[in-house]
Amino acid sequence: MRRSIGLAFAAVLLGSAASSALASDLAVPMDEVRMVAFGKPVTTVYVGNPAIADVTVIDSRHVFLLGRSFGSTNLIALGQDGRQVANAHVTVFSRGGSTVTVQRGASSVTYACANAQCRAAPMPGDAQTTFDTVTGQADKHQEQSIKAASTQQ
């Protein structure tokens, strides 16, 4: 009897420890995901500002946290009874060394760099022409792929 009470108490403490561990800050690089595990099953997960971070539910104890743009927000998870299981501060930060921003007067352009090559990677605040150029290239590539697929059939 004492052993089962002791085990139940230990399980409650472990659940609380997992929940309080999540209550600390979460940090995720922009455009990357991190898996977040909850100490108890959750039914609702809410992000304060989905423009900064977003979640995708994997199962009742796990979500993927996506860093969308620079900034801070929070994540709250509720159990089936509506009680708070987790409340965490989320910070989305830049991946160091992989992007370069060129500032020309009031206009800026961001480039993603890898293997000594940089390509335009528009970010919020960049010049509209950068967005138009990248979007136009993607549209042209898609059109060529569709044409190639239709000629092969």
Image (cartoon, helix red, strand yellow):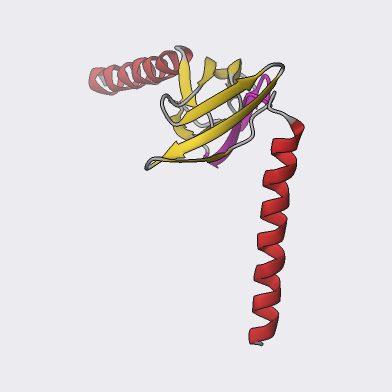
Q: Looking at the picture, does residue 134 appear above or below residue 123? A: below
Is 37 magenta? The answer is no
Is 30 left, or right, of 48 in this rendering?
Answer: left
Q: Main secondary structure of the magenta part?
A: strand
Instruction: Give coordinates of residue 147: x percent, y percent.
Output: 70, 75
User: Which quadrant of the figure contains the N terminus?
Assistant: top left
Q: Quadrant of residue 13?
A: top left
- Residue at 51%, 32% (x, y): give it: 41
Foreground pick, 65 / 136:
136
Q: Looking at the picture, does residue 80 appear above or below residue 133? A: above
Q: Residue furthest left?
A: 3
Q: Is residue 75 visible?
A: yes
The magenta stretch spans which residues? Answer: 43-59
Q: Is residue 61 visible?
A: no
Q: Looking at the picture, does residue 27 appear above or below residue 32? A: above
Is 78 left, or right, of 29 in this rendering?
Answer: right
- Residue at 72%, 29% (x, y): give it: 127
- Residue at 70%, 81% (x, y): give it: 150
